[in-house]
Image (cartoon, rainbow, N blue to C red):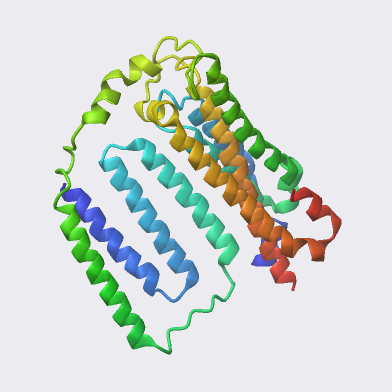
Amino acid sequence: MMQIYLLLGAMIVVAILAVELKDLLSSIVALGAVGLLLCIAFITLKAPDVAITQLVVEILCLIILIRATLKRDLPFSTTGRWFLNTLIAVIFISVFLLVAAKCLKDLPQFGYPIMRVAGTYLKEGMTKTGAANIVSSIELDYRAYDTLGEATVLFATVIGILAIVRKSGVKKEGEEDSEENE
Amino acid sequence: MNKTNEKGMSLIVKTITRLTVGIMLLYGIYIISHGHLTPGGGFAGGVIIALSFVNLMLAYGKEVTLKKLPKGVASFFEGMGAILFLGIALLGFTGGYFFFNFIAKGEPFRLFSAGIIPLFNIAISLKVGAGLFAIFISLVLLKIEAEKK
């Protein structure tokens, strides 16, 4: 348990750094450190599947962030209603923490959940689906509807981004981009 | 910095990329095809494949990469992955219900086992890899357009 708390503390420190740093590149690097520490935390909790996905998606997101946002001036104004904004944020955070503290009391203890459904999966997963990787057998066999929904979300995202980009790209470039964007 | 980026980076980066891109692609294919045996699976493997093409694009610029994998081909693979996923799921009706595992399950811990799960992994990897690469291309093209203005 100790190393988890150390990792969490380091993550919080680096996340605060990422918000407070003035340089955009340094801020993105600090954000990458948060993802890396989260990946190590997943490995410590013995979840290599999630760790691989976290690491890979983090790298891709950082590359996209660096390539797409660097050297573009993002308007972020801190002047104006500074007091009101801080007050609202503090109120929201305190309400959230209070509700969370009340809810988290009723959760089962860490690492010892009620294994009614998961116990069945663990016992019968390999004989029923034939997959040695239990995570794969759950997400593609028992819970395949979840995966279908996730694929639909990704499809909608790609279509949305392509549609938005096409609108600004077509008028300037002419023919070749508009056909390829389809 | 930015103008050299569009035509490609320095010779060192180009050489290293030429040597490592194939290995990255193979690693992605390994993760996908062994998704039902070892950690990983369709999503992670698809992202790794997309990353190999993104790497190529960062090192060589967009002309070389788009010649290797045009945008139309990427969107074709994306739709193909979705249709493959749904088609295999619909084929389950031959045995009873949606998402029915209708192929023989075979022996555990072998590469050809677990029925439809490896096929689902392949379909998802096609979809995720092509989709994320398409998103990356679009954002980069948008940025280049914005800089021209």
For the C terminus of chain B, the quadrant is bottom right
Residue B54, position in %: x, y? 61, 48
Report the residue at 47% width, 18% height from top: B101
Q: Residue at x 16, y 37 (%)?
A: A112
* Lateral position of residue B47 relative to residue B64, left or right: left
> Which of B15 and A178 lies nearest the eye of the viewer?
A178
Q: Is residue A99 above or below residue A58?
A: below
User: What residue appears at the point 43 percent right and 89 percent down from the top-left corner?
Assistant: A80
Residue at the farthest right position: A175
Viewport quadrant of the N terminus of chain B: bottom right
Q: Nearer the viewer, residue A158 or B41?
A: A158
In this rendering, the answer to whether B22 lies above or below A171 is: above
The residue positioned 71% from the left and 41% from the top of the image is B69
* Residue A47 coordinates in the image, percent (x, y): 31, 37
Quarter holding residue A50: top left
Q: How many marks?
A: 0
Q: Nearer the viewer, residue A33 or A177?
A: A177
Q: Tell me: B82 left or right of B68.
A: left
- Is there any visible trace of residue A61 in the rendered image? yes
Query: Does B43 sit above or below residue A25?
Result: above
Q: As displayed, is residue A165 above or below residue A79?
A: above
Residue B58 visible in this rendered orientation of the protein: no
Q: Give residue A68's position: percent from left, percent from top.
A: 59, 62
The quadrant holding residue A119 is top left
